[in-house]
Image: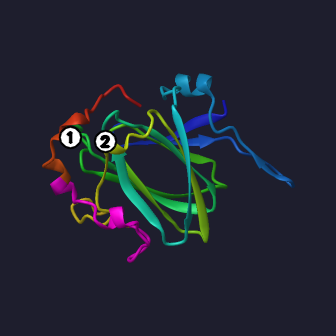
Amino acid sequence: MAFSIESRHLNGLLVLRADMHNDDRGHFMEVFRADQFSSLGLPVSFLQDNQSRSKKGVLRGLHFQWDPPQGKLVRVCLGSAFLGIVDLRKNSPSFGQWFAREISADSGVMVWVPPGFANGFCAVSDLADIQYKCTSVYNPAAEGNIRWDDPQIGIPWPVRKPVLSPKDAQAPSLHDWLRRPESDLFAYEPSAG
């Protein structure tokens, strides 16, 4: 099998490893196969692919979408990035808890971020390209974000003063997000992931 589950976190978040075949020319790996994803209990219907390039010190996130809820398969395809992910599902046993890990293009590691989670990343190499397959199309009217440095969450980001978009610089805290009615739309499903 080309894919395996390396570890499980936060009631649904999965770290996957893809077989990487290296030789003197470089490397090759499969990044998606519906038959193998299905056998691992992962979604096989992805409706949108995104790629982001960031310079060192750029932090994007923590982002999420509630209508329709969006799951993401995230991987680094150039350089290295530190991923930060938070469970926003109010009825989840891991609500408000975070997972973080640095991954690189050469690691063969991907992370499945289920719907109901906020995710972000910080480029730690000079350039980092992040690709993510999404289970739903982007809906700007139903997207949200949480402050990257929210002390209630406490992700240990590798930068103190990241380069942020104006939107991310003004993101609400988790506490403020929870006061919005949309925060009730994420549901924990024990059989997911």
Front residue of 121 and 172: 172
Q: Give the image quarter of residue 84.
A: bottom left
State the image coordinates of residue 130 (x, y, percent, origin top left).
Answer: 56, 53
User: In which quadrant of the rendered image does the N terminus lie?
Assistant: top right
Residue 129 appears at what percent x and percent y?
Answer: 60, 57
Q: Pointer 1: residues within 10 angstroms few (<14), some, or many (20+)?
A: some
| Element on which disc 1 rests | helix
> Residue 170 falls in which quadrant of the image?
bottom left
* Nearer-the-camera pick, 39 or 133: 133
Residue at position x 32%, y 35% in the image: 67
In the image shown, does 118 or 96 lie closer to the viewer? 118
Is there any visible trace of residue 37 in the rendered image? yes
Q: Which mark is residue 142?
A: 2
Residue 68 versus residue 178 in the image, above or below: above
Identify whether 124 is placed above or below 146.
below
Residue at screen point 21% across, 55% down: 174
Q: Nearer the viewer, mark 2 or mark 1?
A: 2
Check the image and name the residue furthest to the left.
179
Is-magenta flag for residue 175? Answer: yes
Disc 2 to disc 1: CB gap under 8 Å: yes
Quadrant of the snapshot with the C terminus? top left
- The residue sitting at the front extreme is 141
